[in-house]
Image (cartoon, grey):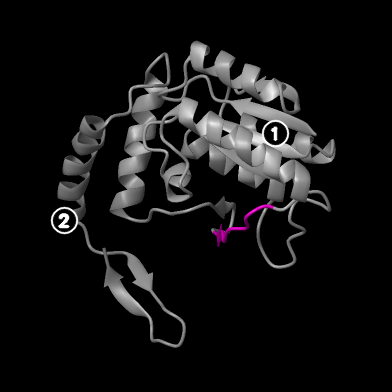
Amino acid sequence: MRAVLIVNPNATSTTAAGLALLAHALESRVTLSVQRTDHRGHAIEIAERAAEENVDVVIVHGGDGTVNEVVNGLLGRPGPGAAGGGPHRPAVAVVPGGSANVFARSLGIPHDPISATNQLIDLLGEYRQSRAWRQIGLMDCGERWGVFTAGLGVDGEVVANVEAHRKRRSTGKGVSATRYIRATVPTLLRSARRDPTLTLQLPGGEPVSGVH
């Protein structure tokens, strides 16, 4: 069974020691290729090649952003008539390496990378036998797939401000609850002074304008 391990070395809780342990454990179960990302969108490119090369499993060691890139690389651009990334779709596994790891936690994957690695080794054994995986729903966000959430308005602005802060730091790390609070307070104050610009429409209902 062939696997590609996609690692974001700038993810908050990713360490060289943890990566070495993960790679060593996986090599006992699969034919492994380790690929490190070095720019935004790189995980999309690696995932696209993995699908083209008929890799069986793509393993993500990073945060939620890296998971999102991998999913978009495997499935391609969403929309009516989307091909879904071609006839071959590798299974996706996650070993948390970010700060929040919301996607991994929602699937019951341990936050601790060592525990998550042990769980993954067991799951790879089951997958080798059955070739069956769990399917999840995704969101069509127009330009890309949303894996578990999409932020609009104030929420989207807060995330954009935090990401801008990450870009200004040489390591790309440093995201914390305090950083989100510092970004949220001024964003909320600015929003309170602006006219609402969003319109909400649910299936079967009338549009509701004037939404913040």
Observer-nearest of 210 and 200: 200
* Left or right: where 175 falls relative to 181: right
The residue type indicated by label 1 comes to Glu
> Which mark is drawn over residue 192?
2
Q: Which of the two discs, 2 and 1, labels the residue nearer the N terminus?
A: 1
Task: Where is residue 22? Give x, y as percent.
Answer: 58, 21
Residues rendered magenta in the picture: 133-140
Q: Is residue 116 above or below residue 25?
A: below
Mark 1 Cα within 10 Å, few/some/many (few <14, many 20+)? some
Observer-nearest of 50 and 179: 50
**At numbered mark 2, what does the secondary structure look like: helix, strand or loop?**
helix
Task: Where is residue 83? Give x, y as percent.
Answer: 77, 58
Q: Is residue 57 above or below residue 21?
A: below
* Left or right: where 118 falls relative to 130: left
The residue type indicated by label 2 comes to Ala
Task: Where is residue 69? Give x, y as percent.
Answer: 59, 40
> Which mark is drawn over residue 45?
1
Write the residue at 36% across / 49% down: 156
Observer-nearest of 47 and 199: 47
* Left or right: where 6 falls relative to 211: right
Q: Nearer the viewer, mark 2 or mark 1?
A: 1
Q: Is residue 95 visible?
A: yes
Observer-nearest of 191 and 111: 111
Q: Quadrant of the C terminus?
A: bottom left
Task: Where is residue 87? Give x, y as percent.
Answer: 84, 53
Residue 198 is a magenta residue: no
**At numbered mark 1, what does the secondary structure look like: helix, strand or loop?**
helix
